[in-house]
Image (cartoon, grey):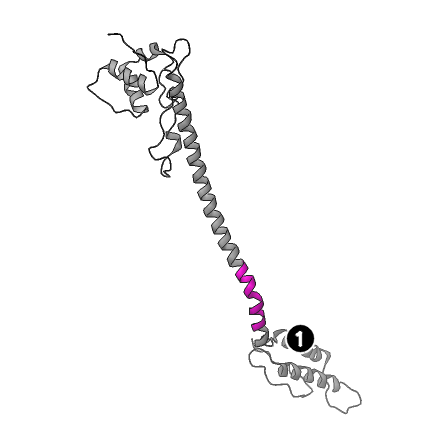
Amino acid sequence: MALIAPRNAAGIPVPAQAQGPPTESDVGAGFDYLQRLYLHTSKDLQLASRPTNAEIGAAHVHVAALTAAHAPEEAAPAWFIAGLTAALAPIKADVAEIKRDQADIKRDQAATTKDLKVVKRALKALERDNSIMRNTQRGEGIVRPFDIVKTPGPLNPEADDVNDGDYYQDPTQAPWSLPALRDIHAIRALNGTQADRYIEAYKLTPDNRASLDKKRVTIALSIGCNVHLYTS
């Protein structure tokens, strides 16, 4: 918006209109105009007309507007910019190093998480193997009942694309809900559907042509029961 000095009835020349953002010269001209208005209010001067209070007030407003709109260019000298750049260089290098360290930490955390997952799977596999081994020492399971042998783990213990909840499950619980095989009588009592489900749960090779008794023997061996289920 153009900043035009207010005119006066005393005929005092007004300064030229400021072009664009007011310069220091424009501000100075505005002050000079205001001073001349004050000078022409002197009663010692023989003037036909003097500036009114309203005209002087308008001149004050004009000078204030010039001053507020004045935006002198304060570009930093080249030597300052060069010095600032040099001072910031090690800080920027430190920030970059911190970012690299953070990336390394994230990679280490991911590797640690994977290692922990592998360790947990290994412990579950060991627990399962121990259950099978203990069952081999318990005969028919009558005096000392068999351990419940959980379902096996993934083929690749280090695989990332598997759901751990699908492995090392208790076959007596959901989703299997099968009878607990605590002794040879429980194994002998399995019906065809239950035997097929145990073969599926333990990931045994199914044989549709096998008799139910043979399936029961296969299941017994898989949990560590090494006594004869049936006498010939």
Q: Is residue 81 above or below residue 183?
A: below
Residue 45 on image: x %, y %: 77, 91
Q: Residue at x 63, y 81 (%)?
A: 24
Residue 60 vs residue 100, the one in the foreground:
100
Give the camera-side residue of 101 and 126: 126
Residue visible at 47% across and 50% down in the picture: 104
Say which residue appears at 32% left-offset and 16% top-offset: 220
Residue 41 belongs to the span the image colors magenta: no
> Looking at this view, is 188 or 4 the one in front?
188
The kind of secondary structure element at disc 1 is helix
Report if residue 91 lies within the magenta region.
Answer: yes
Quadrant location of the N terminus in the rendered image: bottom right
Q: Which residues are magenta?
A: 81-94
**Is residue 148 visible to us here?**
no
Residue 100 place in picture, x, y as percent: 49, 54
Please state the horizontal and vertical placement of residue 79, each as a whole percent of the image: 58, 76
Front-most of residues 204 and 46: 204
Most extreme residue toward the bottom is: 46
Q: Is residue 100 above or below residue 138?
A: below
Question: Relative to 103, is 150 above or below?
Answer: above
Q: Is residue 135 left or right of residue 213?
A: right
Disc 1 marks which amino acid? Ala
Horizontal side, residue 69 vs residue 108: left or right: right
Q: Residue furthest top?
A: 231
Dominant SS of magenta comes to helix
Q: Residue 139 in the image: state x and y as whole percent.
A: 37, 12
Q: Residue furthest front?
A: 137
Q: Does residue 111 appear anywhere in the picture?
A: yes
Task: Estimate how packed mark 1 is, as few (under 14), some (14 to 19) or many (20 or more) residues with alpha carbons within 10 Å.
Answer: some
Label 1: which residue? 64
